[in-house]
Amino acid sequence: MYFLGVDIGSLTCDAVLVDDTAAIVAASVVPTGARNVEAIARAKDEALRAAGIEEGQLSALVSTGYGRERVSGRASAVTEITCHARGMAALLPEVQVLIDIGGQDSKAIRLGPDGRVTEFAMNDKCAAGTGRFLEAMARALQVDIEELAELDRGAAGTQSISSMCTVFAESEVVSLIAEGAAVREIVSGINRSIASRTLSLVKRVARDVKQLKVGMSGGVALNAGVVRALSAALGAEILVPARPDTVGALGAALIARERFSR
């Protein structure tokens, strides 16, 4: 038996396939683009093809993410908060506070036993500190977004990004470039601004995380520079699974398995 989880976000659509033992069989990540229904189909097809099975062999499918209602053939649609918590509990069961930064929103989630959500906080509708924010910063710096992960290496922390509005922050970065500021200092300032904003979210679910295990999921967790800045701001190590961008889809697949079994 096979169970599929699909996480449709603003930047990527992720699919994870698990078997009846809860082992991960295959995973795929594709850009969402403007046509999310096509992205959903592609993510599903790539995961099924990687596993060497057909859609008819699926026992259940659960969807999550902002576009979860658009996934056809689903057994149910579950919030991304629940799915990220469930996925992280399977990968790193020791995590007690989960930071999930996706394409358009950020969340801090307090976890209880077995990945149960006991409390959570979300950012407002502004995309500051999310994947969209980082895309805008990379565009202003004229670098690929993947390069941002290491561009802060060796920075002394001499520059700060005061605005968390994506539009104003982009203008601020352009001004710093014109003034001759070093790219590594600008990127360091960007990362520290994201960390500062995320810290306020975390404090809403846990006043002091120094004695707690903190984990991170979502596509921004692939950015080592942001993870380092967050770790420094929190004063705690941040645990990141091997595929943080597929944690939500994994959680959805595991929920599909559990509900089918019941």
Image (tube, rainbow, N blue to C red):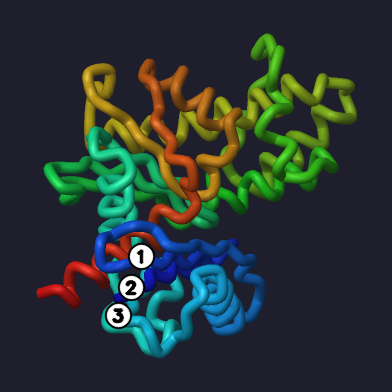
Disc on the earlier residue, 3 or 2:
2
Q: Nearer the viewer, residue 158 or 76?
A: 76
From the viewer's perspective, is 219 left or right of 98? right
Q: Which secondary structure, mark 1?
A: strand
> Which residue occupies 68% across, 9% down?
156
> Relative to 162, does residue 22 appear above or below in the rendering?
below
Q: Of the residues under marks 1 and 3, which one precedes in the sequence?
A: 1
- Classify residue 94 by image quadrant: top left
3D distance between C-alphas at marks 1 and 3: 11 Å
Which is nearer the eye, 68 or 23?
A: 23
Where does the N terminus fall, quadrant-wise? bottom left
The amino acid at mark 2 is Phe
Residue type at numbered disc 3: Ala
Q: Residue 135's x, y, as percent?
A: 68, 49
Instruction: Look at 47% across and 27% down and name the residue there.
Output: 230
Q: Residue furthest top?
A: 156
Residue at 57% from the left image edge and 62% from the top image edge: 29
Which part of the image, by quadrant, shows the C terminus?
Answer: bottom left
**Mark 3 highlights which residue?**
60
Residue 157 is tagged as none
Labels 2 and 1 touching (C-beta < 8 A): yes
Q: Nearer the viewer, residue 95 or 157?
A: 95
Q: Are marks 3 and 2 in contact (CB under 8 Å)?
A: yes
Disc 3 crowd rating (10 Å Cα; few below 14, some 14-19, many 20+) is many
User: How many labels sit on residues?
Assistant: 3
Identify the residue under disc 2: 3
Q: Position of residue 155 (x, y in %)?
A: 70, 14
**Drawn side of residue 110 relative to residue 196, left or right:** left
Residue 18: assigned label: 1
- Assign a secondary structure to mark 3: strand
Real-space CA distance between mark 2 and mark 1, rounded to the nearest whole angstrom: 5 Å
Looking at the rendered structure, the kind of residue marked 1 is Val
